[in-house]
Image (cartoon, grey):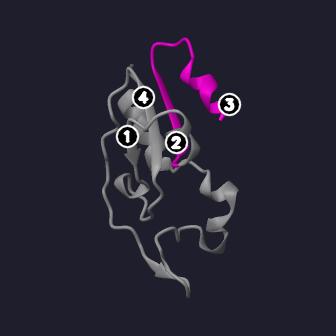
Amino acid sequence: MEFFMKFTGARTIRVCIENPRGLPEREYRRADQIIQPHQFGHAVSKATCLWLKNLPPLAPTDIVEPVRKYDGKRWRTWVDAGAKAHTSKCRSKTFPGIAKAMAEQWGLY
C-alpha cells in the first residue's frame, strides 16, 4: 500500500495507476475505472482497477466473450495460461491488448 500511495502523490500532470481490486479500493478510494481483458481482445475476466489523473477513461477496443472452463470446483474465466494461470506472477501481468489501448489512447497526452 505504501508503494501504491507514492504514485497517488506523484507530481506529474497525468497519472494512471493500475492495480487489481483489493486493498487500494478499501484503504485509499474507489477506482475511477474497472476494466476487463475481454474488453481488449483477451477471452478472460480479471477485474483491473485504474486510478486516473487528467486522463479519460480507457475505451474498450475489441470486446470478446470470456472463455469459461469448469475446474471441478467452479467455473473459471482465467484459462488462457492453463495451469499456471493461478500463480501470482501470471495474474499480475498486463495484457498486451490493454497496454496497446493505453499507448494508443493516452500516448498523445
**Which residue is at a point 59% across and 67% down the rendered structure image?**
81
Q: Residue furthest front?
A: 27
The residue indicated by pointer 4 is 52
Q: How many marks?
A: 4
Where, by quadrant of the figure, is residue 104 drawn? top left
Where, by quadrant of the figure, is residue 34 drawn? top left
Percent of width and height locating residue 32: 38, 35
Where, by quadrant of the figure, is residue 106 drawn? top left
Q: Earlier in the sequence, mark 2 or mark 3?
A: 3
The amino acid type found where label 2 is placed reads Arg
The residue indicated by pointer 3 is 3
**Which residue is at a point 38% across and 51% down the rendered structure image?**
40
Q: CA distance from mark 2 to mark 3?
A: 15 Å
Residue 53 shows which numbered tag? none
**Which residue is at a point 64% across and 66% down the rendered structure image?**
86
Classify mark 1: residues with Cα within 10 Å, few (<14), some (14-19) or many (20+): some
Q: Earlier in the sequence, mark 1 or mark 3?
A: 3
The amino acid type found where label 4 is placed reads Leu
Percent of width and height locating residue 41: 38, 56
Of circles 2 and 3, the one toward us is 2
The amino acid type found where label 3 is placed reads Phe
Q: Is residue 14 magenta?
A: yes
Q: Are marks 1 and 3 in contact (CB under 8 Å)?
A: no
> Where the C terminus falls, by quadrant?
top left
**Which residue is at a point 33% across and 67% down the rendered structure image?**
65
The residue indicated by pointer 1 is 33
Q: Earlier in the sequence, mark 2 or mark 1?
A: 2
The residue indicated by pointer 2 is 26
Q: Nearer the viewer, residue 55 or 107?
A: 55
Q: Which residues are magenta?
A: 1-21
Q: 30 above or below 75?
A: above
